[in-house]
Image (spheres, rainbow, N blue to C red):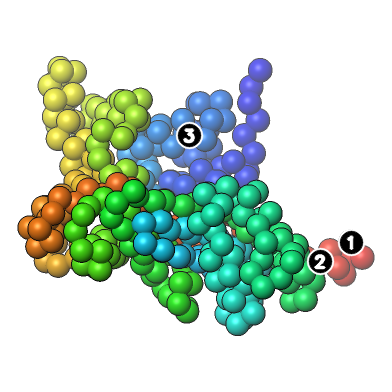
């Protein structure tokens, strides 16, 4: 049975890859409508122009962040418009929700059931009351937390609109016996680097699943085969040549410790920066983990055709 390829599927793939509409439709047809497989196919054919796109900012609201010694938490609270996000009352709500987020340990349901600061209501009830008061839909979309037994959690907010509030929030957990204030200072620089590096997925290479590495390797090999200058070359030669690209383009992009450190002159890696920090702090430093939230990533706004809406209204629809 042939899979039906909808216009919405084609548009979604085009938004993800930047490839042409017909190329997207052809790719979807070849893989029976599997979006992820179609992305891989377009990349293998060299038709994807957006492999580095991590997700479009397609929702308004704010990211709220809090770091308290060895623990930290981040929340995303969405609103329909940026106008509401700039409202003092909304900002106060996001800040208060963030303040109780550490205790929820990344569980949205638990956070919604937590008592909202200064009231007897839950966070969920308070948000509903705000919706009724302001007249715009709002929601606590997600939350995450991170902690270490010994060390510190540093925070950084990019596109900051107020203390602890903004568009991109990052937490970095560092394990160390070094001076806490100096450790946080270094951690905040690493957090700034991560804020500017949306492709970052893991701290170390060992955290990447083998199937993910195999998938990327296969794509690089297929791309090498498609290059005219490689015509007739044995597969083992192409595979070996592709390893260099795998390390530089994939590992160098998604692995934090392998990335070129953006704070400073950009001539060293994050791993080098950690070594330098250890010398300055006089103690070993381990990047135990990080969280990066960008407002609206992964959410698609419903696109309205204003002309079509007017025609429907005129027709009484």
Q: CA distance from mark 3 to mark 1?
A: 37 Å
Q: Is residue 235 above or below residue 86?
A: above
Query: Which quadrant would residue 303 be assigned to in this image?
Result: bottom right
**Residue at disc 3, secondary structure:** helix
Of labels 3 and 2, earlier in sequence is: 3
What is the secondary structure assignment of the residue under circle 2?
helix
Q: CA distance from mark 3 to mark 2?
A: 36 Å
* Residue 160 appears in view: yes
Q: Earlier in the sequence, mark 3 or mark 1?
A: 3
Residue holding disc 2: 311
| Label 1: few (<14), some (14–19) or many (≥20) C-alpha neighbours in 10 Å | few
Are the residues flagged by discs 1 and 2 in contact, CB closer than 8 Å? yes
Q: Specify which label sits upstream in the sequence, 1 or 2.
A: 2
Residue to which mark 3 is pinned: 36
Residue nearest the observer in this picture, 304 or 182: 182
Q: Which residue is mark 1?
A: 317
The answer to whether residue 260 shows anywhere in this view is no
Circle on res. 82 = none
In this rendered view, identify the residue nearer to me: 284 or 292: 284
- Relative image position of residue 4 (x, y in whole percent): 65, 30
The x, y position of residue 54, in whole percent, is: 41, 51
């Amino acid at each position: 049975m042939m899979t039906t390829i909808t216009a919405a599927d084609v548009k979604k793939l085009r938004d993800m890859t930047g490839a042409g509409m017909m190329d997207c439709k052809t790719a979807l047809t070849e893989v029976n409508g599997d979006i992820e497989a179609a992305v891989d196919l377009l990349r293998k054919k060299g038709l994807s122009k957006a492999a580095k796109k991590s997700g479009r900012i397609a929702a308004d609201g704010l990211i709220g962040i809090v770091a308290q010694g060895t623990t930290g938490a981040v929340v995303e609270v969405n609103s329909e418009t940026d106008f509401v996000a700039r409202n003092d009352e909304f900002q106060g709500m996001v800040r208060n929700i963030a303040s109780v987020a550490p205790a929820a340990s990344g569980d949205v349901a638990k956070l919604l059931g937590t008592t909202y600061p200064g009231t007897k209501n839950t966070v969920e009830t308070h948000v509903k009351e705000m919706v009724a008061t302001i007249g715009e839909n709002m929601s606590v979309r997600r939350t995450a937390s991170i902690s270490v037994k010994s060390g510190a959690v540093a925070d950084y907010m990019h596109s900051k609109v107020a203390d602890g509030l903004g568009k991109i929030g990052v937490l970095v957990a560092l394990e160390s016996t070094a001076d806490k204030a100096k450790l946080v200072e270094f951690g905040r620089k690493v957090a700034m680097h991560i804020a500017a590096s949306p492709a970052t997925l893991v701290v170390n290479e060992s955290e990447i699943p083998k199937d993910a590495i195999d998938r990327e390797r296969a794509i690089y090999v297929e791309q090498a085969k498609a290059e005219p200058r490689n015509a007739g070359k044995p597969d083992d030669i192409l595979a070996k040549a592709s390893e260099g690209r795998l390390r530089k383009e994939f590992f160098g992009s998604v692995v934090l410790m392998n990335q070129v450190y953006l704070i400073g002159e950009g001539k060293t890696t994050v791993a080098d920066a950690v070594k330098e920090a250890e010398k300055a702090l006089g103690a070993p430093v381990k990047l135990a983990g990080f969280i990066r939230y960008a407002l609206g990533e992964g959410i698609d706004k419903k696109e309205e055709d204003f002309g079509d809406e007017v025609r429907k209204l005129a027709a009484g629809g």
